[in-house]
Amino acid sequence: MRDLEQRLVQAAEWEKKPRPVVSVAQPVDLRDPREYMDKTRLMYQMAHLAFATDSTRNITLMLDSVNSPAITVEGKAVSDGYHNLSHHGKSTTKMRELERIDREHMKLLAGLFAELKSHPEGNETLLDRTMVLYGSNMGNANTHVTTNLPVLFAGGGFQHGQHLAFDRERNYPLPNLFVNILQRFGLETDKFASSTGTMRGMELKRSA
């Protein structure tokens, strides 16, 4: 009961908190669907600004590849939409186009990480205090395989700079990572959905 009372008090204080004042120009939405990458960059910039001003503690972005048209990457048009290219049938031409899009996505994500890392928060950075989970619901979109999903996880005070690979045939479920995340939030839990424990190899950064 006391925990609930404290949360209600915190919620009330949040509502009375003054709106942040920033020197950033108001973002302008991009209307041309071909400017998909520029819009993704804009959304990342807004996410960084929202965290930096403590306007929210949680952001979810869905990069809608299914409905994306033939877009522009580095000033050059891609031959087809992402969804169609992802069903490449091992065509080298389509896979090259798909790689162009994926590389651009990684550049934009790296830009978000850099912005979060450049923003100080006490004796840490905003990236240290922000957990960023990035991934796909397909392990191989060409055949709609939903196992061995590619997932990037950054920030949150964890030790990064590593690639964790597991048994491709007898892998454990992705919700194991979610248990790590919940525990990092301070929740006393060892279960989430179909989890079987926590993800191996997830260590916290050592203090300097």
Image (spheres, rainbow, N blue to C red):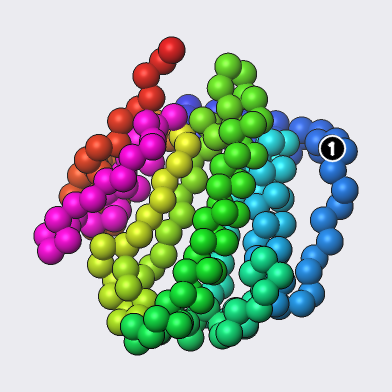
- Decide if residue 1 is in sight here: no
Residue 167 colored in magenta in the image: yes
Query: Looking at the image, which residue is at 35% across and 35% down?
Result: 183
* Residue 32, percent from left and from top: 76, 77
Please tell me which residue lies in front, 67 or 183: 67
Q: Main secondary structure of the magenta part?
A: loop
Query: Looking at the image, which residue is at 25% across and 37% down?
Result: 201
Q: Is residue 33 above or below residue 5?
A: below
Name the amino acid type tagged 1. Answer: Val
Q: Which residues are magenta?
A: 157-183
Q: Is residue 125 above or below residue 81?
A: above
Please tell me which residue lies in front, 152 or 156: 152
Give the position of the N terminus as an image quadrant.
top left
Q: Is residue 162 above or below residue 142?
A: above
Q: Is residue 82 left or right of residue 38?
A: left
Q: Secondary structure at mark 1?
A: loop
Residue 6 colored in magenta in the image: no
* Residue 163, percent from left and from top: 31, 45
Q: Is residue 103 left or right of residue 143?
A: right
* Residue 72, percent from left and from top: 67, 74
Q: Residues within 10 Å of mark 1 (few under 14, many from 20)?
A: few
Q: Which residue is mark 1?
A: 22
